[in-house]
Image: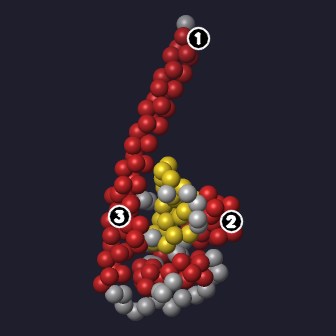
Amino acid sequence: MKVIKIQFFTVLLLILSVVDSFAAELSTTRMVSMIRPLEQYAMQYGEGDIKAYVFVDPKCPHSRDFISMIHDNKKMRSIYRYYIFFYELKRFDSHKLIGTLYASSSPLQKMLEVMVGGKELEPLSSLSPQIEEEISDIESVAVELGVNKRPYLIIAKEWK
């Protein structure tokens, strides 16, 4: 009798994991469709064929570690094309820094200087309405996606 119960629960767990995997795939597809309109705001880093969407806060030490890891690993950049979005963790009060990075003439380079190189950047005292709209658009999608930590990574299973 115990053998039958164990087999039944094993089969049940297997079925649930397959269903969960299928649901996760649908969820990833939905997430990617929500993020795709934001690609225009992203800082692209890497030349790979697989898209990876990343939400980071420039003041978050875990986000900095993640960006440093990408920066230091050419192979990661050759496999993935990272679409990096700034999304503030309220405890770091990084809104103006995020806006300053987006407003710079080379946001990716400035982000690397700050997040990898440790450069201190004086935030702008006020942000343009366009930058505020970009930050708001990213925040709206991030909230809908349930982005609750940084870095937050979504790998698109599609090619370019």
Callout 1 crowding tier (Cα within 10 Å): few <14, some 14–19, many ≥20: few
Label 3 SS: helix
The mark closer to the camera, 1 or 2, is 2
The residue type indicated by label 1 comes to: Val
The residue type indicated by label 2 comes to: Lys
Q: Where residue 83 appears, x then y in whole percent? A: 49, 66
Look at the image and tell me whether residue 153 can be seen: no
Nearer-the-camera pick, 44 or 112: 44
Task: Locate residue 15 relative to residue 145 in the image: left or right.
Answer: right
Asked if residue 144 is positioned above or below residue 9 in the image, the reply reads: below
Residue shown at the point (47%, 86%) measured from the top left:
104
Looking at marks 1 and 2 on the same chain, the residue that comes earlier in the sequence is marked by 1
Could you say which disc has been placed on residue 37 in the image? 3
What distance separates the C-alpha of mark 1 from that of mark 3?
52 Å
Look at the image and tell me in which quarter the N terminus lies: top right
Could you say which disc has been placed on residue 124 in the image? none
Q: Looking at the rendering, which quadrant does residue 96 occupy?
A: bottom left
The residue type indicated by label 3 comes to: Pro
Could you say which disc has been placed on residue 3 in the image? 1
Q: Which residue is mark 2?
A: 74
Look at the image and tell me whether residue 129 can be seen: yes
